[in-house]
Image: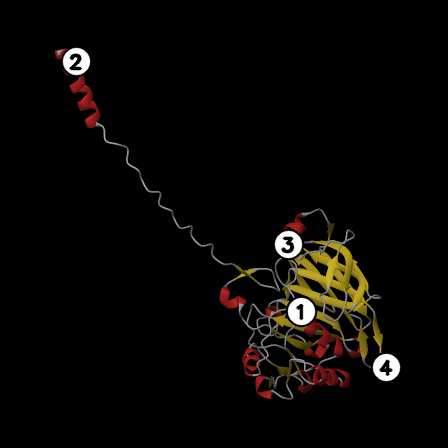
Amino acid sequence: MKKILVLIFSIFLLVGCNKPPEIKEEVKKEQPKEEEKFFSPYTGEEIDKDTYFKIPFMVIVENSKTSRPHSGLIHADVVYETMAEGGISRFMAIYHKDDSPKIGPVRSARPYFLDIAIENNLPFAHCGYSEEAKNRIEKEKLPSLNEFLYEKFYWRDKNRPYEHSLYTSSNLRELIKEQNLIKSPSKSLYFNSDFWQNTLDNAEKVSLNVNKYYNTSYVFNNNKYTKYMDGEKSIDAEKKIPIEVNNIIIQLTDITLQKDNLHIDVRLIGEGDCYIISNGKYIKGRWSKKDSNSPTVFLDKDNKEIPLSPGKTWWHIFDNKIKVAIE
């Protein structure tokens, strides 16, 4: 009997010394919010929030020999280059990521520059216009920043010949705010750096023999293309550094002389051949633009869109007859 009592007592002690298991409430940890990232619609590069919400705008810049060296083109995200009268090219530059204290020399508008501005949905700075461009600006109520109307946002450089001396700056953003012309970019270029790791044809040097008056070329060095015009390196007038870009677009089309034998038409709708050049390589494709309200896209032989590398772009729109050499 004593043995039984001892056994019962031992069991009682054993059970009493063991605490019942604690039931712990599961504490849900809040997942840290992923930080929002911002990418430039014009360069594909990651930028901070303040930069992303800067007001973008465009400026028409001349390219006669007397106008060189240019000011501020090194700060542009994208520069369009096409022809004007007399076999001379002209630029239309997009400014967004970087500020520029001096841009120019500023020149007059043409109808095809208006089409480029419409495609990008951006206000554009210029000084004057052809009669056709003037009529379209007024009829279509386009966001023109004409120096004729807003001269306080422009100035003359007295060290330059008068007709090549008009300049502006990123302070145009204040004018855009005043005139309630702030636009959201309607176009974002397509970027994919991995594409340019593929095996493609080499493009260490690019030459465009435009006509007997003008040629432009690029040399690939340190992962960028340095621009040359008429055999001379293109240097910024203020900073004394060369224009360097990550991407070169060559869009070939029909450029025809108007009946006045002076002004030209540049076909921007339809399709044609193109070359996309980046990272020391190139691919030939075709460009396509369905109508005035659609974007220009670049397609390979399989009808897939050709991307750019993140970075700055120089976009040429030249006649089918120019000589293109890539090596």
Regarding residue 326, the answer to whether it shows in the image is: no
Please name the residue that numbered disc 1 is placed on.
79
| Three-letter residue code for mark 4 | Asn
For image coordinates 73% across by 49% down, the residue present is 200
Residue 142 is drawn in which quadrant? bottom right
Q: CA distance from mark 4 to mark 3?
A: 43 Å
| Front label number (2 vs 4) | 2
Please name the residue that numbered disc 3 is placed on.
192
| Three-letter residue code for mark 2 | Ile
| Front label number (2 vs 3) | 2
Q: Secondary structure at mark 4?
A: loop
CA neighbours of label 1 inside 10 A, class few (<14), some (14 to 19), many (20+): many
Split into 4 quadrants, where in the image is the N terminus? Answer: top left
Q: Which tag, 4 or 3, sits closer to the chain's start?
A: 3
Whether the residues at callouts 3 and 1 have beta carbons within 8 Å, the answer is: no
Q: Is residue 228 above or below residue 164?
A: above
Horizontal relation, residue 28 to residue 49: left or right? left
Please name the residue that numbered disc 2 is placed on.
4
